[in-house]
Amino acid sequence: MADRQPHPACFGPYLRYAIDSDFENFVTDLERHTRAVFVGETSGGSPNLYGDVTGVELPAAGLNVDIATRYWQKSFAADTRVGIEPKVVVPLSSTAFFRGGDPVLAAALAWH
């Protein structure tokens, strides 16, 4: 079997704020089963997490809320991390955003 070389797997700052359990499970699987190199910011969720939300109406309060219905243990049981750290850290930058730049992509292409 050929030696697998690491390849960048980008997840940018914009995903940090649009995180859900499906994405975090995907990132955890990439971390555990590949040699992907993460570039960007820390992921927005724990490798072991509650997810698969369902809507619940609270009629007395006049609210609809989402409640997690399943615990996902995608990492080892004692994994207490609150996110997955990238190997190449690229902080969120409003300057780059307003310029239309993509510093995460630039860092991924420059890595290695």
Image (cartoon, rainbow, N blue to C red):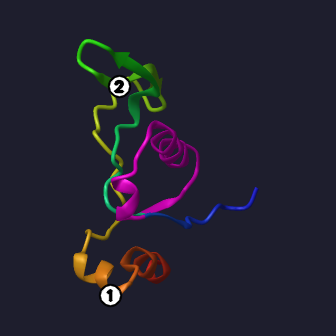
Range of residues picked out in magenta: 12-38
Amino acid type, label 2: Asn
**Residue located 40% across and 64% down the image:** 12
Mark carried by residue 21: none
| Residue 59 or residue 101, whichever sits in front | 59
Is residue 21 visible to us here? yes
Task: Name the residue carrying label 2.
Answer: 64
**Residue located 43% across and 41% down the image:** 20
Query: What secondary structure is the magenta-colored segment mainly?
Result: helix
Category of crowding for the residue at label 1, using alpha-carbon neighbours closer than 10 angstroms: few (below 14), some (14–19), many (at least 20):
few
Task: Name the residue carrying label 1.
Answer: 99
Is residue 87 visible to us here? no
In which quarter of the view is residue 94 placed?
bottom left
Is the residue 14 above or below the residue 47 in the image? below
Category of crowding for the residue at label 2, using alpha-carbon neighbours closer than 10 angstroms: few (below 14), some (14–19), many (at least 20):
few
- 62 horizontally vs 100: left or right: left
In which quarter of the view is residue 61 placed?
top left
Q: What element carries label 1?
A: helix
- 14 horizontally vs 5: left or right: left
Amino acid type, label 1: Arg
| Residue 60 or residue 51, whichever sits in front | 60
Discs 1, 2 touching: Cβ within 8 Å? no
